[in-house]
Image (cartoon, rainbow, N blue to C red):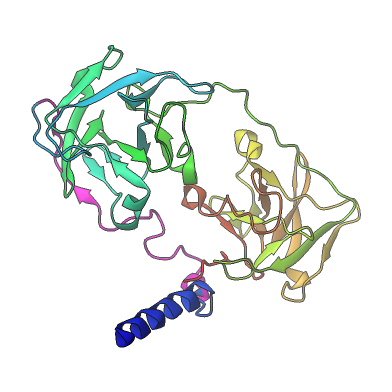
Amino acid sequence: MKKYLAATLTALAAVVSLSACESPIYGAFTEDKPAAGSTSPTQEPQQNQQKPANGAQGISQDGDQEQKVLKVSRVPGLTPIVTSATGRTVYRFDNDSANPSQSNCGGDCLKSWEPVLAGSGVVVEGGGIDERLFGTLDRPEGQQVTLKGWPLYYFKNDLRLGELAGQGLRGLWFAANPEGGKAKSTKPAETTKPVQKDVQTLTVNVVDGFMPFVTNEAGRTIYRFDNDSNSPSRTTCTGECTKKWEPVLAGKKGVKVLSSKINRASVGTIDRPEGKQVTLNGWPLYYFHKDKKLGQTAGYGVGNLWFAIAPDGKKAARCL
């Protein structure tokens, strides 16, 4: 028993040391490319041919052969969505494929996202969904329901009607509408007006789970966008994009670099309608509207295009 306990404590210590970023993987981004597999939190895609849903043989989440009952529900702030009979929100994943139907959610992804399984078939309660749009695809857990080809999922934190914790997560997960598309917000779009300070500050910070990245003096995370260009410096984030991504504007008195890790010669600006946007090694800089203080990195990896920026202008890597 003592030997077993000692081995267990040793294994736990190893996990803690890895999570503390003592083994940097910064080299994974030295070529300024996303690390392998960063497009989704999944393992190998599961390629399947879509099958008619009705009469499909599979195991439901309760381990029986009951039919899967789905319906159309309305929740505040969204167009109509698909839910389970009890009102649990049904989602689709942008990294999946509808033609052919293919799930790219496996491995760790399944710790948060539960496939909607068909049981002995799919039934629509109350109408509002064309049952011909349903199908299934094979996966280890059973036959996953698809809607217009898109595999369907539940989010682990949603349990009852009105809970939408997975909506918009990582810019890839969305409540499904009755046609198999993404449910849309019915709220007025948020607007984020870039703020021009007297002096814009740049410094470097470290938070759990990341290699050092650039922030302002208050600790607000600064990002770069893969669709932009650094040679020449060019922004492609305009219009709707700026409602979530706020350009980092030079202050009235310019930009002040507060960390020796940032080469002052690598800091520049480009012109845009809101003012002069700060660049680092040519990359235009942005804030994410949900980040307000040090440690918040909600924009990291959104769409697999947005990343916290490292002091040298590359993508700040996650730690093991």
Residue 218 in picture, x, y percent from top left: 78, 57
The count of marks equals 0
Above or below — where is 305 with respect to 280?
A: above
In the figure, 247 relative to 213: above or below?
above
Q: Nearer the viewer, residue 201 or 153?
A: 153
Q: Farthest front residue?
A: 1
Q: Position of residue 299 (x, y in %)?
A: 57, 50
Q: Is residue 192 left or right of residue 115?
A: right
- Answer yes or no: is residue 96 visible: no
- On the question of residue 205 being in view, the answer is yes
Instruction: Tell me: 245 left or right of 320.
Output: right
- Measured as percent of width and height from the top left, residue 159 is found at 39, 35
Q: Which residues are magenta?
A: 26-54
* Residue at the spot 67% in from the left edge and 56% down from the top edge: 222
Per the picture, the main secondary structure of the magenta-coloured stretch is loop
Q: Residue at x 33, y 25 (%)?
A: 86
Q: Is residue 257 left or right of residue 65?
A: right
State yes or no: residue 41 in magenta: yes
Residue 176 location, quadrant: top left
Where residue 296 appears, x then y in whole percent?
A: 63, 54
Q: Is residue 239 or residue 60 the one in the foreground?
A: 60
The foreground one among 57 and 131 is 57
Is 37 inside the magenta-drawn segment? yes
- In the picture, residue 190 is in which quadrant? top right
Residue under the image location 52 percent in, 25 percent down: 185
Q: Classify the position of the N terminus by image quarter.
A: bottom left
